[in-house]
Image (spheres, coloured by chain):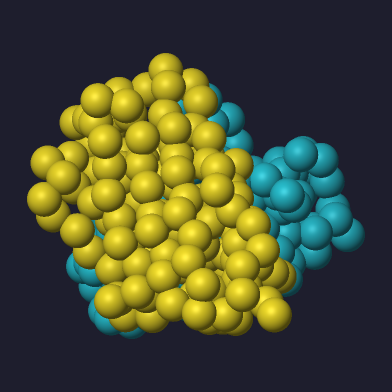
Chain colours: A cyan, B yellow
Amino acid sequence: EIVMTQSPATLSVPPGERATLSCRASQSVSSKLAWYQQKPGQAPRLLIYGASTRATGIPARFSGSGSGTEFTLTISSLQSEDFAVYYCQQYSNWPPYTFGQGTKLEIK
Amino acid sequence: VQVVESGGGLVQPGGSLRLSCAVSGLTFNSYAMNWVRQAPGKGLEWVSTIGANVVSTHYADSVKGRFTISRDNSKSTLYLQMDSLRAEDTAVYFCAREGEVDYYFDHWGQGTLVTVSS
């Protein structure tokens, strides 16, 4: 099973600033990495797939990078609606699909 | 686009429950479908996947032998039969469709809460 590790667990950033979230895989997942955003009481929303491709309707301030075992989600200028929990997920070697434990992005 | 789960509720340990997920406004029968759960205050855990062809199924070790995934392509509906339920199965259960070009999850329902408690 591929273990996904996200860091940091919590990230405090002021609105308008850049946020950088990290995700590491225990073995290579190539570019088969997705990022999801989840707000309280809501379903996860797909942001990025293929490590760097934005899903339909996702603003350009969200970008993904990386391949192999190291991945980054960057939000270039934080808006109030961006404060949420973010999960990475590998879909290279399944079952099982595996998610990171999440990074909570909070307002500083 | 609507993905709507139903069937959650309170059940005693050892009991059974059947979840449903109705999909509309979205192509259903050409894509694999998935169940993902989230225990209270915890992260996301993949539970089960069924292929578009209905034949191929996969389960997390934590539910293997107790849960059964199925689908009715004529009704664009996904199911999860949950038997021998345990307290640790308490979670919000989401259904999610396979992505357009690969095996990520692109459309999710709002979830249905399953509580296993005496």
Q: Is residue A10 left or right of residue B85?
A: right
Q: Is residue A35 visible?
A: no
**Numbered marks: total:** 0
Q: Above or below — where is A85 with respect to B89?
A: above
The image quarter containing residue A54 is top left
In the picture, measured across the screen, residue B62 lies left or right of residue B11, that is left
Seen from the viewer's position, the closer of residues B16 and B36 is B16
* Image-based side of A55 in relation to A83, left or right: left
Q: Quadrant of residue B114?
A: bottom right
Q: Residue at x 59, y 53 (%)?
A: B8
Q: Residue at x 23, y 64 (%)?
A: B58
Residue A102, image x, y percentages: 59, 67
**What percent of the width, then of the height, locates residue B6?**
55, 43
Q: Relative to the observer, which residue lies in front, A77 or B92?
A: B92
* Depicted B11 relative to depicted A107: above or below: below
Compare residues B1 and A6 and report the one nearer the observer: B1
In the displayed structure, B49 sits above or below B89; it is above
- What's the residue at 80%, 64% (across, down)? A12
**Residue A75, how many percent across, how many down?**
62, 47
Task: Tell me the residue at 88%/59% (across/down).
Answer: A108
Q: Residue pushed farthest top? A: B25
The image shows residue B10 at horizontal and vertical percentages of 66, 63
Considering only vertical position in the picture, is A86 above or below A93?
above
Q: Quadrant of the C terminus of chain B?
A: bottom right
The residue sitting at the right extreme is A108
Residue B17 visible, this orientation: yes
